[in-house]
Amino acid sequence: EAQVTQNPRYLITVTGKKLTVTCSQNMNHEYMSWYRQDPGLGLRQIYYSMNVEVTDKGDVPEGYKVSRKEKRNFPLILESPSPNQTSLYFCASSSPSQGAGQEQYFGPGTRLTVT
Amino acid sequence: KQEVTQIPAALSVPEGENLVLNCSFTDSAIYNLQWFRQDPGKGLTSLLLIQSSQREQTSGRLNASLDKSSGRSTLYIAASQPGDSATYLCAAPFSGNTPLVFGKGTRLSVIA
């Protein structure tokens, strides 16, 4: 089954404790991205990657890091989480090489709480 | 800056009604437009994708239209059911290599 998976689904942590949220897709997609969703602000992109070893900042990259060492994986790293990073996080993937109209597929989300 | 707007933010209708959700965008040079459904606390489910060269797409009781010249898309839901209750989001990339810009969604409640 074609899918985007995220782990963990729920995470409660404390300020300053480094964490990683994993994202993996099995569709051989080149493009992957991370979004955060907050009430009243909607979905905003954090980082994206056009292909292996190619990453770029989205709208709200501060406090986050990413890496793209393999095509299927795109982990999101919070080196020193803070309470304002409490949010619902989504990973997404698509395949621009398929041409116009590529559909984006989203993972199930990771609910992060930083106390 | 490209923006996507959805009005109204919330909508409540009785079961069985046909309804239209609206989405507008600031730049007519969108690459495509995608409609999603999100249940509370859950992920996004893709409903329909309209390519920039298309005018509409249909899936079951759902029909999405796209009018690039006016910067608008609509999602038509026929014969609404309580199970349609969710937040509906529209999103568009403004070129093939840029991320999706999302509207803030319309929260739909279908009352039995």
Image (spheres, helix red, strand yellow):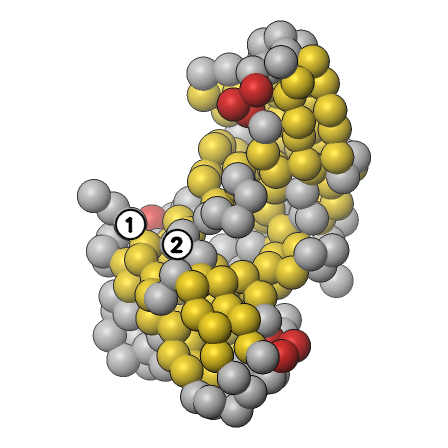
Seen in the image, is B96 located left or right of residue B11?
Answer: left
Instruction: Examine the image and state in which quarter residue A84 appears.
Output: bottom right
Residue type beneath disc 2? Gly
Report the side of B3 relative to B38 (left or right).
right
Q: Say what secondary structure mark 1 lies in.
A: loop
* Amino acid type, residue under disc 1 in the picture: Gln
Can residue A6 be seen here? The reply is yes
- Which residue is pictured at 42% across the width and 45% down the height? A103
- Give the residue displayed 69% in from the left and 13% down from the top: B14
Question: Where B95 falls versus A64 (above or below)?
Answer: above
> Where is residue B81 shown, x and y percent of the image?
56, 16
Q: Chain of mark 2?
A: A
In the rendered structure, the answer to whether residue A10 lies left or right of residue B104 reads left
Q: For residue A54, say whether it is visible.
A: no
Comparing A4 with B25, the one in front is A4
Assign the C terminus of chain A to one quadrant of the image: bottom right
Question: Circle 2 — which element?
Answer: loop
**Position of residue B68 in the picture relative to residue A90 (left or right):** right
> Image quarter for residue A6?
bottom left
Above or below residue B65? Residue B71 is: below
Residue closer to the observer: A104 or A3? A3
Residue B77, image x, y percentages: 59, 19
Q: Are labels 1 and 2 assigned to the same chain?
A: yes
Q: Residues within 10 Å of mark 1 (few under 14, many from 20)?
A: some
x and y percentages locating residue B59 in the rendered image: 45, 21
In the image, residue A99 lies at what x, y percent?
A: 39, 48
**Mark number displayed over residue A3:** 1
* Circles 1, 2 touching at the beta carbon (< 8 Å): yes
Q: Quadrant of the N terminus of chain A?
A: top left
Instruction: Say which label, 1 or 2, has the lower sequence index.
Output: 1
Residue on which disc 2 sits: A107
In three-dimensional space, the C-alpha distance between marks 1 and 2, rounded to whole angstroms, equals 7 Å
